[in-house]
Image (cartoon, grey):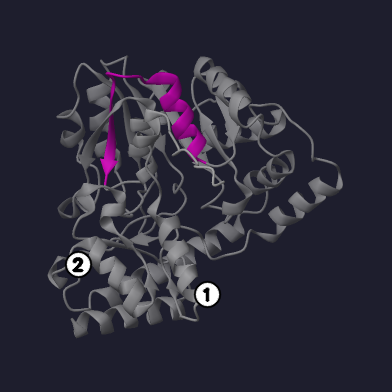
Amino acid sequence: MTQTVPPLKLASRMSRLGTETAFEVLARAKALEAQGRSIVHLEIGEPDFDTPANVVAAGVKALQEGWTHYGPAAGQPDFREAIAAYVGRTRGVEIGADEVCVVPGGKPIMFYSLLALTESGDEVIYPNPGFPIYESMIQFSGAKAVACPLRESNGFSLDPQDVISRLTPNTKMVILNSPANPTGGVTGREQLAEVVAALRDRPDVWILSDEIYSRLLYDGEEHVSPLSDPSVRDRIILLDGFSKTYAMTGWRLGYGVMPAPLAAMVTKLMVNSNSCTASFTQRAGLEAITGDQSAVETMRATFDVRRKHIVGLLNDVPGISCHLPKGAFYVFPNVRGVGLKSDELQRRILSEAGVACLAGTAFGAEGEGYLRFSYAASIETIEEGVRRVRGLIESL
């Protein structure tokens, strides 16, 4: 007798949960490769460099020395102190270790901050196009996601008036990201100061500053952080980590810096979800942040060469124009001249040309008319990818 399996009945909150399209495209690309297709990967936001040798050695040593057990939920004390010292030095403020929470990757800081601070009826302003998990986590927390456009006409830099005009009595948080994913846009000192000035008299509004690409800047650009402004210091949550700077994506290591009372609540969320971040990973992170930094500069300089090269190649493709980004390792070319919607063009580029990239709409509605390519790939890979894209577009 056949037993009928009842349909899966999910909690209503699951309908509010989004995804990260990059991993979906990667899965489709891998499936095509399994069928024997040649695929050029320009979709994933991951350095193509190996983790620096000194960092790997520190991780191996930690495993050999028995750093394989539970640790404190907020992170190992000496590691938190090292992060506090690094953030304090680079942002020009005094940071205590009790303001640091170590987590497995950067996303938990987004998730925990929104869970701890927002609820139904609250509004959160976030960049669009922007990292898709912002909107997903805002909605999952029950708050209202308020999109703040980033425009090519402004170099994809944040326009302070776009933030200010969206502030309401219900605004609970503003999310900032500079350098930005997916555009590579950078928010300058004057622009950030204008945003902070508007929030100075709103003690009920938090700022979540995603600075994961802070060391990947070009053309003399400086990184500025709202954490450096003492007038809003008690309402800043800084998100940073090791994935992009040190090519440690698979190590799953990030951190947040925030007022100690909030850090205690984020630690409680860690206890209830992850228990702690892997101990041996933290020993590798300690070496990364305190040891030889030459590999970081080598990687940044290499990205800079690739940045200029891919922009030049894309600007020679009919129907495409590409702005030169100032940070991160992405380009966000305008493809409106091709005459196809972003998601349709992205699908055809993968299926017909064998190049994996992302539609701009994977990063929000404001991304229509754009694609995102990662230049965290070799010059040869970039050239082959753009050659294939050009061939497809010329055949349309």
Circle 1 packing at 10 Å, graded few (<14), some (14-19), many (20+), is few
Q: Can residue 223 be found in the magenta stretch?
A: no
Residue underneath mark 2: 335
Q: Is residue 323 visible?
A: no
In 3D space, how far apart are the residues under numbered discs 1 and 2 (Cα atoms)? 29 Å
At horizontal 52% and vertical 14% (from top left) the residue drawn is: 261
Q: Can residue 117 be found in the magenta stretch?
A: yes
Q: Is residue 384 visible?
A: yes
Question: Do the residues bearing badges 1 and 2 touch, measured as CB atoms within 8 Å?
Answer: no
Q: Position of residue 204 (x, y in %)?
A: 32, 15
Span of residues in magenta = 106-128
Is 6 displayed left or right of 203 in the figure?
A: right
Is 341 displayed left or right of 358 in the figure?
A: left
Question: Which of these two is toward me, 304 or 281?
Answer: 281
User: In the figure, 380 relative to 241: above or below?
Assistant: below
Question: Which of these two is toward me, 349 or 99?
Answer: 349
Circle 2 packing at 10 Å, graded few (<14), some (14-19), many (20+), is many
Identified by mark 2, the residue type is Val
Is 394 displayed left or right of 97 in the figure?
A: left
Residue underneath mark 1: 34
Identified by mark 1, the residue type is Ala
Q: Position of residue 359 (x, y in %)?
A: 29, 60
At horizontal 66% and vertical 44% (from top left) the residue drawn is: 285
